[in-house]
Amino acid sequence: MSSLLFDVVDRKQLARLRSDSLRHRVQASTTGEEIIMSVLDPTLDPVQFRIETDLPEGSNKKVSILSRTDRVVAAVQVIKSGGENNLHSHRHLDGVWTVLAGRAKFYGPGDVIMADLGPFEGILIPRGVQYWFESGDESQVLVIHQVEASDIAMLSIQDIIKDRINHEAPKESLKSTLVASGAGE
């Protein structure tokens, strides 16, 4: 029976993780390229959120983590021209992407186009699939909703970041801001 429970997280474990991470709420890199405003803790409680689409001055991209459990992450990315990412995949995350505003182009290896999406269109990217995407219209800001589901427990944002496999070097021109807010903040 214990082999079935090796990565199950209960409410007490989440409460302990949440209290342990309170002292790490505000972090910022020394380069200013990426700002982590707070750490988002996993929860097993309902979380209400609001999507903010403002883009910080000087930033090409903002990733707002809206809510998460140990298995699911919901986020919104706001991207203008130059906010594209690099060819990558995820070991354990299946992603569903839905365009809310603007256009998005998703590419596979060799820059083969996988999808050209407008508002209220989306794509499923299963774990292991190599992809990258960009804003598909330089005259519009792309607002895209992202939901990632994991086949293993991911207890920290670092676990999610480590799940990513880069197949090309990250774009040097990318200036992004990551915004995360926890339940009850």
Image: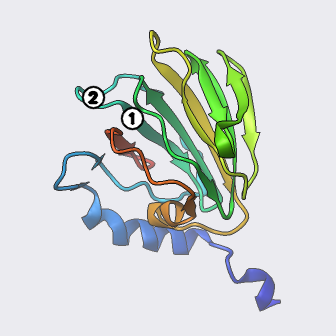
List x then y, in percent, for residue 121.
Answer: 72, 21
Residue furthest to the right:
1
Which disc, if any, is residue 62?
Answer: 1
The figure's colour scheme reads: rainbow
> Would residue 172 appear left or right of 120 to someone viewing this image?
left
- Does any portion of residue 49 appear in the rendered image? no
Q: CA distance from mark 2 to mark 1?
A: 8 Å
At 70% from the left and 31% from the top, the residue drawn is: 113
Q: Which of these two is toward me, 26 or 33?
A: 33
Figure quadrant of residue 139: top left
Determine whether label 2 and label 1 are within 8 Å by CB: yes
At 44% from the left and 27% from the top, the residue drawn is: 79
The residue labelled by disc 2 is: 56
Q: Which of these two is toward me, 171 or 148?
A: 171
Q: Which of these two is toward me, 52 or 29?
A: 29
At 67% from the left and 51% from the top, the residue drawn is: 130
Three-letter code, disc 1? Lys
- Does any portion of residue 11 appear in the rendered image? yes
The answer to which of marks 2 and 1 sits earlier in the sequence is 2
> Would residue 32 appear left or right of 185 to someone viewing this image?
left
> Would residue 83 appear left or right of 100 to someone viewing this image?
left
> Would residue 9 appear left or right of 178 to someone viewing this image?
right
Relative to 175, does residue 78 appear above or below in the rendering?
Answer: above
Three-letter code, disc 2? Pro
List x then y, in percent, for residue 17.
Answer: 44, 71
Residue furthest to the front:
110
Q: In the structure shown, which secondary structural element does the residue marked by tag 1 occupy?
A: strand
List x then y, in percent, for residue 147.
Answer: 64, 42
